[in-house]
Image (tube, grey):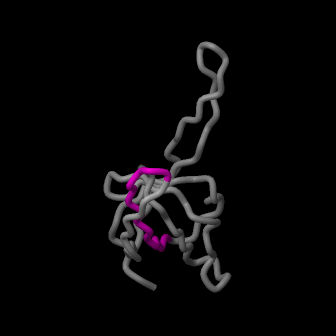
């Protein structure tokens, strides 16, 4: 197991209604955990006539139920979305692996 020294906020989406009745997605922090963070790559790519940066990282946290693929994480003040469901390492309920992509 890797040392978990980086603070990470886990957030889940909540759908509320605006004054006009339109659905609005808001985010609520449901946990602040410490994690081991590993940057995998930084890739600049050109898509739809725009340049964007994609940063993919792996974050290891202590196992906690309820983390889902539609949640997001705040790491170092930057917002990241989960790329796929969290992975229960070795199916031992000790650590979760979260693969993250930066939200622009």
Q: Front-most of 84 and 51?
A: 51
In the picture, residue 39 is in which quadrant? bottom left
Q: Front-most of 67 and 46?
A: 46
Secondary structure mainly formed by the magenta segment: strand
User: Is 6 placed above or below 26 here?
Assistant: below
Q: Is residue 82 left or right of residue 5?
A: right
In the picture, residue 7 is in which quadrant? bottom left
The magenta-colored residue range is: 48-61
Find residue 25 and report its horizontal and vertical position in percent: 58, 35
Q: Within the magenta stretch, is there residue 56?
A: yes
Find residue 4 and report its horizontal and vertical position in percent: 38, 73
Residue at image location 41% in from the left, 51% down from the top: 50
Q: In this view, does 74 lie to the left or right of 77?
A: right
Residue at image location 33% in from the left, 71% down from the top: 5
Q: Front-most of 69 and 41?
A: 41
Residue at image location 67% in from the left, 17% down from the top: 21
User: Is 56 placed above or below 17 here?
Assistant: below
Q: Within the magenta stretch, is there residue 49?
A: yes
User: Is 103 placed above or below 5 here?
Assistant: above
Q: How many numbered marks appear?
A: 0
Find residue 49 and report its horizontal and vertical position in percent: 44, 50
């Amino acid at each position: 197991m890797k040392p978990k020294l980086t603070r990470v906020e886990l957030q889940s989406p909540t759908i509320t209604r605006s004054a006009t009745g339109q659905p609005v997605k808001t985010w609520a922090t449901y946990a602040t955990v410490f994690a081991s963070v590993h940057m995998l790559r930084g890739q600049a790519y050109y898509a739809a006539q725009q340049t964007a940066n994609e940063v993919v990282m792996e974050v290891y946290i202590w196992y906690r139920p309820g983390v889902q693929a539609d949640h997001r994480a705040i790491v170092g003040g930057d917002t990241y979305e989960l790329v796929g469901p969290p992975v229960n390492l070795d199916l031992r309920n000790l650590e979760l692996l979260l693969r993250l992509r930066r939200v622009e």
